[in-house]
Image: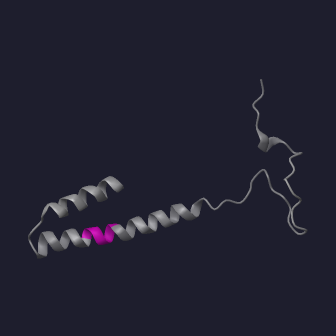
């Protein structure tokens, strides 16, 4: 039994007709999938910098690591 794949059909039409200067592309439509991935990488890197700075400050400058420092480190590692 052949696989039922709508992307292989050539006679697919949209619900309404496209605007005058637009050609419909049902086989390989444009995607915005890369934008959340890039945002996730950038924001994870920024959070890593701030968490490392905070842990460095409490451990080496203040020399007093409390429960909050361990919880932040645990939460940040489990986030990754």
Residue 12 is covered by the magenta coloring? no
Extreme top residue here? 1
60 shown above or below 75: below
Horizontal placement of 69 versus 44: left or right? left
Residue 10 image-quadrant placement: top right
Q: Give the residue at x 18% y 59%.
A: 70
Horizontal placement of 77 versus 32: left or right? left
Which quadrant is home to the N terminus?
A: top right
Q: Give the residue at x 18% y 74%.
A: 57
Horizontal placement of 80 versus 57: left or right? right
Q: Give the range drawn in magenta.
A: 48-52
Q: Give the residue at x 84% y 58%.
A: 24
Residue 18 image-quadrant placement: bottom right
Which quadrant is home to the C terminus?
A: bottom left
Report x, y in % for residue 31: 67, 59
Type of secondary structure dominating the magenta stretch: helix
Between 35 and 13, the one nearer to me in the picture: 13
Q: Give the residue at x 25% y 73%.
A: 53
């Amino acid at each position: 039994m052949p696989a039922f794949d709508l992307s292989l059909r050539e006679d697919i039409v949209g619900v309404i007709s496209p605007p005058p200067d637009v050609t419909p592309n049902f086989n390989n439509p444009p995607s915005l999938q890369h934008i959340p991935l890039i945002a996730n990488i950038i924001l994870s890197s920024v959070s890593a910098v701030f968490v490392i700075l905070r842990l460095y400050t409490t451990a080496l400058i203040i020399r007093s690591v409390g429960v909050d420092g361990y919880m932040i480190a645990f939460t940040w590692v489990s986030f990754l």
